[in-house]
Image: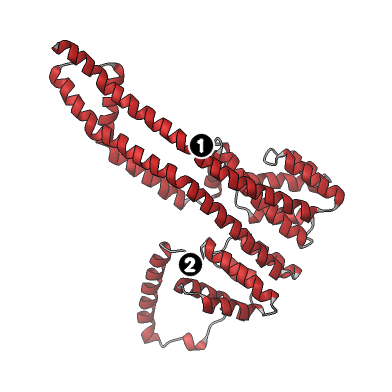
Amino acid sequence: MGFKLKDIKPNETVDQDTVKQQKQSFLTKEIKLFSKPFSNKVKEDFYTELSVLLKAGINLKEALELIHDSQKNKLTKEILQGIIEKIISGESLSEALQSNKQFTSYEYFSIKIGEETGTLAQVTEQLGAFYVRRNEQRRNLIGALTYPMIILTTAVLVVVFMLQFVVPMFQDIFEQQKVELPAITKFIIGVSEFVKDYGWLLILIIVLLIALNYAFKNAVRFKKVKDQIILKTPYLGNFVKTVYLSQFTQAVTLLTASKVPVVNSIQLVKQMINFHPLQEALEDVEQHILKGDSLSKSLKQQKLFDDKMVAMVKVAEETNQNEFIFDRLNKQYNIQVEQKSKMLATIMEPFIILIIGVLVGVILIAMYLPMFKLSSVIG
């Protein structure tokens, strides 16, 4: 947007206005730090409503104004107002979204494709469906993990309490009676003393790791290492891979429906999905396609893509049903994500109970073994 003459003030008021703007900017940043004006739930409603309005024949500016007027959250309204102003100034919707950090590259490229192919209403409908599924997956995952996490938190507090208070009580008794301690008891007492002396350091390290993750989450090298670790983690890696394959198949469905060539589709999907192992695999797929290989053959050479996908893509190429096949694959992966999220909770719950039971059992055994020796000495 260009400068507006009415916004230019006399020199003597510039300093005061600058100070006020800085204070407002600081307060706004502090508020935004703890809120999400465009959460996934808001995006679900936004794209669904935008699609309905566009299909009803309402132009983009009026559709956005109607959505803006229906919002109650002040920050959400401010973001929508900014988008509307950019569209009035001549920018496209994709450009307006790209300049706002609340929107992802996936949304930007999807909207851009819709604008270039004249299918913006269909693309926004698919984005709405994408966030419906994503929010459903999130709800299922949170619901599935809530109980195990409560158990884990409670159990950790119990173990810390035992190490911090119960073990030192036994330690005082053993020292007074001068009982010879078994190796396991010495080890538990050593752990207890470490927690008592350096517990604050452990908490500090955890906080530091969380802060580093937040600070470097967009750094390429850091994200590459983190994604590789996640991918190699038992079960969790397979679950995360399925989530991103679901996004991959949905993106390809969107692109094939918009008649985008295969090579361009791979190039765009590579930018749309922010998962480094998938981006590397798609880079190799792109190179093989440029050399003359088919999509199915190119996918087959990457471990990230399973045999089912390769077989279905081969069928799609032979029958020229790419959009239909990728849509079916997307639905299958979505079902898998839902099933695996539920199974994750089913596996975690007994596993957590088993681990905590073993820890508590070891502590109790370590404390009671010297008691048996003490009773025999007294007897």
> Which residue is more in the foreground, 104 or 318?
318
Q: Is residue 324 left or right of residue 33?
A: right
Q: Secondary structure at mark 2?
A: loop
Q: Is residue 364 left or right of residue 275?
A: left
Where is 28 relative to 325, above or below? below
Please state the horizontal and vertical placement of residue 355, each as a whole percent of the image.
Answer: 41, 31
Residue contact between numbered discs 2 and 1, judged by CB atoms under 8 Å:
no
For image coordinates 38% across by 81% down, the residue present is 17
Residues 288 and 272: in front is 272
Left or right: where 269 falls relative to 20: right
Evaluate whether residue 170 shows in this view. Answer: yes
Q: Amino acid at mark 2?
A: Pro
Q: Secondary structure at mark 1?
A: helix
On the image, the x and y values in percent for residue 269 come to 68, 54
Give the labeled residue for mark 2: 37
Tag shown at residue 13: none
Q: Is residue 154 left or right of residue 1?
A: left
In which quadrant of the rendered view does residue 52 lie?
bottom right
In this view of the protein, can residue 187 be seen by the observer?
no
The three-letter code of the residue at mark 1 reads: Ile
In the foreground, 19 or 133: 133
From the image, tell me which residue sits under label 1: 347
